[in-house]
Amino acid sequence: MNIILASKSPRRSQLLQEAGLDFEVVVREVEEIYPPDLLPSVVPAYLAELKSAAFSAEIKKGEVVITADTIVILDEQILGKPKDKEDAYRTLRLLSGKRHEVVTGVCLLSQAEKKVFSESTFVSFYELSDALIEHYVEKYQPFDKAGSYAIQEWIGLVSIERIEGNYSNVLGLPVAQLLRALKGFRVDFL
């Protein structure tokens, strides 16, 4: 099977490379809109499936397309990518000293079948001082990150108290679950 990663995320590409998969990156712009009555935990799988629809008419035999979406949920509220610095500060203050959920939805699509799944990981932050938040936002500019942070960056090293679940899921792709799902598409990683 020819694997197509439909994501411009360098983290997702890196994760697939580290898993030993050969793949091609092809991106289609999709407006990420979901029904307002969806439970937050269902939104990533919905968006991953929506993104895969952009490929359904042109997918070739022997291809499997991987689409994904990751969100951060705190108190049943989705914390998306920040609009600006102030929004990043606000989001990190909300996460300070709290446990939140990171959910990634994945869709695998071939001519013959489609598989959609999601994985949840819980992340707990220590209390974050205003100085720590300011340093992180100014130096790392996490404006393209759900929840205004990337766990693999400095803030993850100095401020994460606990992770419950799959680490790669927090990076944007639950690799272990993805590899097992790909076996159903006749893709072997070992």
Image: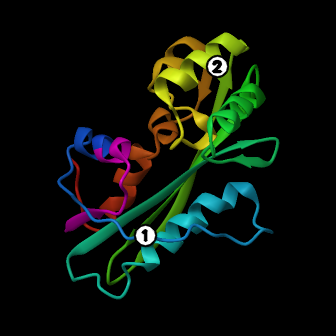
Q: Nearer the viewer, residue 179 or 121?
A: 121
Question: In the image, what residue occupies the spot 32% across and 83% down?
Answer: 111
**Residue type marked 2:** Ile
Residue 110 is left or right of residue 187, and the answer is right
Q: Which mark is residue 133?
A: 2
Q: Would residue 160 be visible to someone looking at this image?
A: no
Q: Amino acid at mark 1?
A: Glu
Tell me the quarter of the image containing the N terminus: bottom left
Where is 54 relative to 138, above or below? below
Residue 8 is one of the magenta-drawn residues: yes
Q: Secondary structure at mark 2?
A: helix
- The range drawn in magenta is 1-13
Which percent across, then down, holds residue 94? Answer: 77, 30
Describe residue 61's horizontal placement relative to residue 73 as left or right: left
Say whether residue 68 is left or right of residue 92. Answer: left
Element marked by disc 1: loop
Numbered tag placed on residue 29 in the rendering: 1
Q: Is residue 173 magenta?
A: no
Q: Is residue 152 above or below residue 181?
A: above
Which residue shows up at 42% across the image and 63% down it?
A: 67
